Amino acid sequence: MRFDVFSLFPAVIRPYLEISILQRAIEKGLLEVHLHDIRSFTTDRHHITDDAPFGGGGGMVMKPEPIFTAVESVLGSPPACPVILLTPQGRTYTQQVAAELAAYPHLALLCGRYEGIDERVREHLVTDEISIGDYVLTGGELPALILIDSITRLIPGALGDPDGAQDDSFASGLLEYPHYTRPAEFRGWRVPEVLLSGNHAEIARWRRQQALLRTWKRRPDLLEKADLSDSDRRFLAS
Ligand code: SAM
């Protein structure tokens, strides 16, 4: 999987790529992240990337020329892969959207700053728009990292445990079951006995039921779309 990230502050993104799962995915050749500083594609003496909005008002707007030049010189014209704008006005990011995007071998991520980007970039260069939630951040770099991180988890071989992402919350349409580790007793609070039993069928059953229960209590909306078996339904009805 290859990402090309276009940003005015690529240094924000770099450190996160140098640790843990992303670093290992890069080392294994499963992930490539190319960071591009939009400012280095300016052609004027002062390397200007933003300007005041036509029509007045506060804030600055990212100019179209350096963005088009950056994306087209790296990815060609038209660009060789989907160009995703991170924006609070995009479609809301979910695990399903992550799975959809993980099917592409190559994605470009465009990070806005200030009041956002000139609308002509959105109209003539961008092919998809993603919001990570109904709140406004200072820039698109953290949202870009959120996409890279969540999509990398879905690349086969990127997680230490091959089944690691399978039980993650949302992957099966449910929230994940609770986890415990050693010690088996801490301050008098014992781990559920079934987890110490060594009976894998019973453990799987308990986990499925905990996931159902937890989803029913915290996110009942998810149950409407989840793929439930007859025994899941019987358990929820009991
Ligand atoms: N004025 C814009 C608006 O109201 O839609 C918000 C601009 S925001 C201060 C600057 C940049 O941060 C955006 O261009 C976008 O790239 C990024 N950003 C902020 N919130 C975001 C969110 N919820 N999802 C994705 N990107 C976001």
Image (cartoon, rainbow, N blue to C red):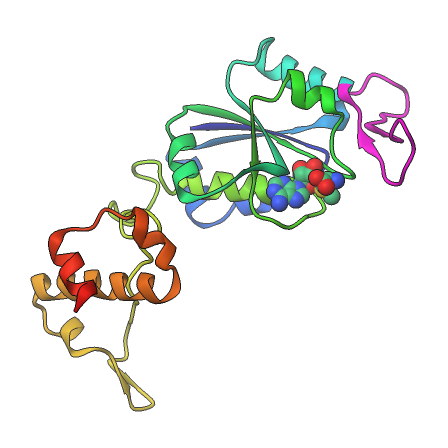
| Residue 125 horizontal side relative to residue 227, left or right | right
Please say whether residue 230 is visible from this viewpoint: yes
Name the residue at the bottom extreme: 188
User: Looking at the image, which is closer to me, 165 or 43?
Assistant: 165
Quadrant of the rendered image holding ligand 1: top right
Please say whether residue 141 is visible from this viewpoint: no
Residue drawn at x 55%, y 47% as measured from the top left: 16
Residue 199, above or below 79 = below
User: Where does the magenta region start and end?
Assistant: 41-64
| Residue 237 horizontal side relative to residue 160, left or right | left
Residue 216's spot in the image, x, y percent?
Answer: 31, 63
Residue drawn at x 28%, y 63% as measured from the top left: 177
User: Looking at the image, which is closer to me, 101 or 149?
Assistant: 101
Does the magenta run of residues contain 50? yes
User: Would you say the magenta stretch is mainly helix, strand or loop?
Assistant: loop
User: Looking at the image, which is closer to me, 37 or 98?
Assistant: 98
Residue 114's spot in the image, x, y percent?
Answer: 78, 39
Residue drawn at x 89%, y 41% as measured from the top left: 58
| Residue 190 horizontal side relative to residue 6, left or right | left
Residue 199, above or below 19 = below
Residue 186, above or below 88 = below
Examine the image and state in which quarter residue 139 appears: top right
Q: Which quadrant of the figure contains the C terminus?
A: bottom left
Residue 137's spot in the image, x, y percent?
Answer: 68, 48
Examine the image and state in which quarter residue 132 appears: top right
Q: Which quadrant of the figure contains the N terminus?
A: top left
Does the magenta run of residues contain 155? no
